[in-house]
Every structure is written in C-alpha cells, then in structure tokens.
Image (cartoon, rainbow, N blue to C red):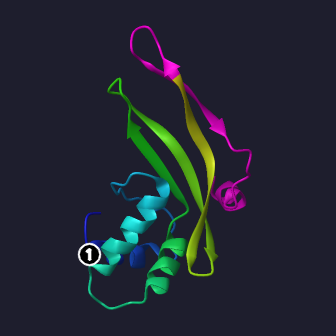
Amino acid sequence: MRGEEALDMLQAMNTGHDGSLTTVHANSPRDALARMETMAMMANLHLPEKAIRKQIAAAVSLVLQIARFSDGTRRLTHIAEITGMEGDVVSMQDLFVFEKQGVSSEGRVLGTFKSSGIRPKFAERLKAVA
C-alpha cells in the first residue's frame, strides 16, 4: 500500500475473513504501523487517530520486517506481533529478531535469528486453522 487505499485495506481486513496480506515500506515494525496510520489518514475522512489505530490493531496480527544488509542480501530481521491497544497506542511485541554477529572474510553478513521466548497471543487461533 502506498496511500489512501490503506483505509480501504484496513476496512476489508476487518470484515471477518482471515488471510489478508499487504506490504508497506518502513524502517521498523513500529514505523510500519505509523505509516499505515498516516496513509489511512490520507483518505481525508477525518477519522480520529484512535479509530484508525483500533482498525490497525484489529486487522494486523504480524509485521515482518526485511532489511538490506551491507553485503547486498535482504533478510528477515523482525517478526513482531500486534497484541492490541494500550490506551491510545497499538501494542506490539517482538517474537523473533535477527542478531547481526559480524561479517565473514568474504564480506557476507553473519548472524542468527533469535526467539524472544514469548508465546504469540494468536498461537491458538493459528493452531485451529492449521
């Protein structure tokens, strides 16, 4: 998504049909949520920020962040779960994070993908449909 169609996407994702997917360019999982909010506001429907944030929290379960590293490779760097709302803020938690550990003698970025140890809140829902 790139603009005001973000609001249409959020509304479609909140119709009770599981299995939506979209992409957005952002610097981090938290920034992805802020970009979604900003793009939804571009629709000029004068919705309160909290209403848009509630739509995001209800529609989005996971944010997967991909980054390009110094060796030119692109890697998954974060898997973050949206856990709901805390006041006016969409709450999220990292489930997995790529930890860069250096660069090989050939110039390849080295690292491992580490679990945060947190059990996803949507695990039971995922298990039910698997």
Task: Residue 63: give x, y in percent of width and height.
Answer: 50, 55
Task: Residue 82: give x, y in percent of width and height.
Answer: 58, 63
- Which residue is outermost to the top? 105
| CA neighbours of label 1 inside 10 A, class few (<14), some (14 to 19), many (20+) | some
The image quadrant where one finds the N terminus is: bottom left
Question: Image height check: is 64 above or below 20?
Answer: above
Q: Residue at x 39, y 14 (%)?
A: 107
Tell how many labels: 1
Instruction: Judge by depth and name the residue closer to the eye, 66 or 89.
Output: 89
Residue 9 at least partly seen: no
Q: Residue at x 26, y 64 (%)?
A: 2
Instruction: Judge by depth and name the residue closer to the eye, 75 or 130.
Output: 75
Q: Residue at x 52, y 76 (%)?
A: 16
Q: Which residues are magenta?
A: 102-130
Give the secondary structure at mark 1.
Answer: loop
Q: Amino acid at mark 1?
A: Glu
Q: Residue at x 66, y 61 (%)?
A: 122
Quadrant of the rendered image containing residue 41: bottom left
**Residue wearing tag 1:** 4
Task: Residue 29: give x, y in percent of width and height.
Answer: 48, 55
Whether residue 116 is in magenta: the answer is: yes
